[in-house]
Image: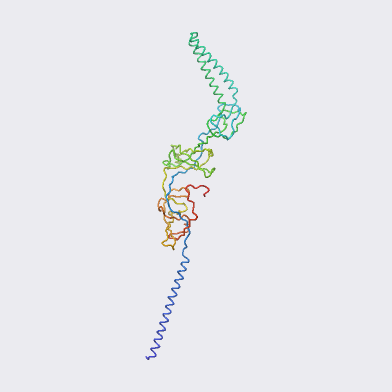
């Protein structure tokens, strides 16, 4: 092989090596560009941080309560009637007005009875004079003991008849048996009433009873004197308070419920007998619970969860969330007690958790918060 052939061979080898280097560099450059675009594409399609509101877990003092549906009943309530028959001479009240105990409501015609009373009063007076005269004569031994005894009996009999007739006359005047408010009457002057005929209803409104039923499982939780509050749709937003005054010793064998009674203060007489009310009864001493708004809870068949917020590791990163199982306790208004799963001071997502999963990045915006009232009023909902 000559010198010329060797030079050609080396030239060809150099060309092949340069070509291979160019190809290899192009492949490397292409892979680098492709990786750059892939990273960019993945970054553009990565999950974006979600905006949520949060609440910091803290302790609250809760008063355990029992709830029941109750019915109002007057402490004193009757249908005012007459014991005697007679014609209505006058009606001395207006339907719906308040009356005092002893106030005259209806006057029946008592003229014949009053006349009879006057005759009996005269007879009793004469019998008394006869008795006094016979006492003097007996002391003077002018009459016997039998005559004095007869005068004594006649005098006492006449006095008894006078008192009986006086009571009869008094019964012709129908009076209010206690303080209260009258209902609507349909009795008119000149109407003849039979004994026991209803004249008007009379209800004592302050205080007023509420009767309610509770399951036998609550028997150990309720005691005489427990604070009770009632509310009704007729007066939305108002709570009328009182105390438990009686607990029925019997449990209904059909329902396994027992009845209790509370006395409710009603100074403005707004509550009326027969009204349906929602009843809340305090039960025992206050308890201390970790609480959250109910909107913070994700309810699932396999367990209830909340999202705990963990702060970012550096200022440029976003906070992340961790889904945690919790054990729920009683509820009160917008709040729910948490018995297990979180601690005081934990930051919990209170709204927006439906778009989250474990490890999601979040942006916190607490400018709007869900309701978190222990005793919400209807206007808040």
Estimate the x, y position of residue 91 in percent, counting from the top left. Answer: 60, 30
Asked if residue 36 lies left or right of residue 112, the reply is: left
Give coordinates of residue 35: x percent, y percent: 44, 71
In this rendering, the answer to whether 186 lies above or below 21 is above
Q: How is the image coloured?
A: rainbow
Q: Where does the N terminus fall, quadrant-wise? A: bottom left
Q: Where 99 falls versus 118 (above or below)? A: below
In this rendering, position of residue 31 left or right of residue 109: left
Can you name the residue that lies furthest to the front here?
Answer: 315
Establish if 233 lies above or below 302: above
Q: Residue furthest right?
A: 190
The image quadrant that residue 126 belongs to is: top right
Across and down, in percent, residue 89 comes to 61, 27
Which sits in the foreground, 211 or 131? 131
Residue 215 is situated, as x and y percent measured from the top left of the image, at: 44, 42
Number of marks drawn: 0
Q: Is residue 231 above or below residue 2?
A: above
Give the farthest residue toward the bottom.
2
């Amino acid at each position: 092989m000559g010198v010329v052939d060797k030079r050609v061979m080396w030239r060809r080898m150099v060309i092949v090596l340069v070509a291979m280097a160019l190809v290899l560099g192009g492949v490397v450059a292409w892979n680098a560009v492709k990786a750059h675009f892939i990273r960019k594409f993945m970054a553009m399609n990565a999950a974006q941080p979600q905006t949520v509101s949060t609440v910091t877990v803290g302790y609250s003092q809760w008063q355990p309560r029992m709830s029941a549906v109750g019915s109002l009943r007057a402490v004193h309530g009757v249908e005012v009637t007459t014991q005697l028959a007679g014609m209505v001479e006058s009606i001395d009240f207006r339907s719906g007005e308040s009356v005092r105990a002893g106030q005259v409501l209806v006057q029946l015609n008592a003229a014949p009875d009053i006349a009879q009373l006057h005759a009996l009063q005269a007879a009793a007076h004469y019998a008394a004079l006869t008795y006094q005269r016979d006492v003097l004569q007996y002391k003077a031994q002018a009459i016997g003991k039998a005559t004095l005894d007869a005068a004594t009996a006649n005098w006492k009999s006449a006095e008894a008849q006078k008192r009986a007739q006086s009571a009869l006359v008094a019964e012709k005047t129908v009076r209010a048996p206690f303080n209260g408010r009258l209902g609507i009457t349909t009795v008119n002057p000149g109407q003849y009433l039979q004994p026991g005929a209803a004249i008007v209803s009379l209800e004592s409104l302050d205080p007023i009873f509420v009767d309610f039923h509770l399951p036998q499982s609550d028997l150990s939780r309720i005691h005489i004197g427990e604070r009770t509050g009632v509310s009704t749709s007729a007066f939305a937003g108002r709570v009328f308070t009182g105390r438990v005054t009686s607990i029925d010793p019997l449990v209904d064998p059909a329902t396994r419920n027992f009845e209790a009674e509370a006395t409710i203060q009603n100074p403005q007489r707004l509550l009326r007998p027969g009204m349906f009310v929602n009843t809340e009864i305090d039960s025992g001493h206050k308890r201390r619970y970790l609480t959250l708004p109910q909107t913070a809870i994700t309810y699932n068949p396999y367990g209830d969860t909340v999202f705990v917020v963990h702060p970012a590791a550096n200022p440029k990163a976003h906070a992340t969330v961790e889904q945690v199982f919790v054990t729920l306790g009683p509820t009160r208004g917008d709040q729910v007690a948490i018995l297990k799963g979180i601690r005081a001071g934990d930051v919990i997502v209170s709204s927006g958790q439906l778009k989250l999963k474990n490890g999601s990045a979040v942006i916190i915006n607490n400018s709007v918060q869900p309701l978190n009232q222990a005793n919400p009023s209807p206007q808040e909902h």
